[in-house]
Image (cartoon, rainbow, N blue to C red):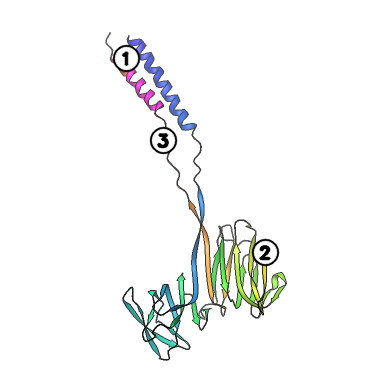
Amino acid sequence: MKRPILILGVIFVLIGSLLTAWDYNSRPACTCASTLSNESVHELRIFNITNGGIVNGTVLAVRVPLMGQNLTVRDPERDVYVVFNRRGELYLPKTPIFFRRIQVDGLGDEKVEVYANLAGGYVFDVKPGMFVVLESVDAIQFPLTRYGAELGFLNPRGRIVIVDQNRTEIILGDSIEIPRLNVTLHGEPRVLKVIYSLTTPKKVWIDGYVDLGNGRVTYYTYGIDLNPIDETLPALVSVERGSSFTAFNYSHFRLIEGECPVEKIGPEGPLSLSLGLLMIFAGLLWRT
């Protein structure tokens, strides 16, 4: 009886080993799903709200129909107040400050023109009706990242440069000039977008429209051949000193790795292995 039990034990061990090995090797390779997430990195806007209205952003300045040299601005939700000082037509805090709501003392229900930074750092100054590049810098550069990025300008003026191994200047005044493409578009620039996308990785796109007056506009789209800076950084967009706009947004894509599910092996292999080992153990202990 001892010998048959040992033989059966060895057979079960072999079967269990084969089943376990097959279970591991037959599973498909884990292919984790990845997605691209679009994130707003920098956003500047000028907008009008009724006194006491919602901002939910960092306030750089306000414009209100008051004449004093300073004014008190409150956030009723956070129970804080800040003194803003007059600079020309605008009132500015000593440093930019976050407000959920904004309420100007002594204004009543009048409109408040708010200059707000809704995302990003403080690299722009304010003037009546516009944001401008700080005078303390030569230019502000934004990367066109490898997974895609977009910059959008409303009413842009000045000079914007796409920097890869070459330099593509976009000159914005009473018209748009792109010397590298030998392009001149007459009319006031209203919208300008600079777009890099994985769908066309060898080009940077310039898109927008100019205002010809009397309700007439001209739309444009130009593709610029890209000579990347390196493998990880296709290009930079440089907003030069003196450039201005009434709204700005910079967003880029980043890769989000999906989680691989942990697959369990089937029970057949381990059960056969366990049964076989028990039978071998029993056979070895058999005394007859």
- Compare marks 3 and 2 and give the one earlier in the sequence: 2
Which stretch did the figure color magenta? 260-279
**Of pointers 1 and 2, the one earlier in the residue sequence:** 2
Pointer 2 residue: 223
Q: Residue at x 38, y 23 (%)?
A: 272
Q: Amino acid at mark 1?
A: Gly
Residue 186, horizontal then vertical, whole percent: 69, 77
Q: Is 220 rendered above or below residue 91?
A: above
Quarter the C terminus occupies: top left
Alpha carbon distance from label 1 to label 2 = 80 Å
Using the image, determine if residue 146 lies above or below residue 33: below
Amino acid, disc 3: Lys
Quarter location, residue 111: bottom left
Q: Which residue is mark 3?
A: 264
Which residue is found at the position 71% from the left and 69% from the top?
181
Does residue 76 show up?
Answer: yes
Please check the rendered image and state whether residue 271 is part of the magenta-colored stretch, yes or no. yes
Q: Are marks 3 and 2 in contact (CB under 8 Å)?
A: no
Residue closer to the observer: 80 or 4: 80
Q: Residues within 10 Å of mark 1 (few under 14, many from 20)?
A: many
Question: Residue 153's x, y, as percent?
Answer: 57, 72
Q: Amino acid at mark 2?
A: Gly
| Whether residue 271 is situated above or below residue 204 in the rendered picture | above
Q: Nearer the viewer, mark 1 or mark 3?
A: 3
Q: Residue at x 31, y 18 (%)?
A: 281
Tag of residue 145: none
Q: Are marks 1 and 2 in contact (CB under 8 Å)?
A: no
Which residue corresponds to mark 1?
283
Q: Position of residue 213 (x, y in %)?
A: 66, 80
**Residue drawn 35% across the image and 81% down it:** 82
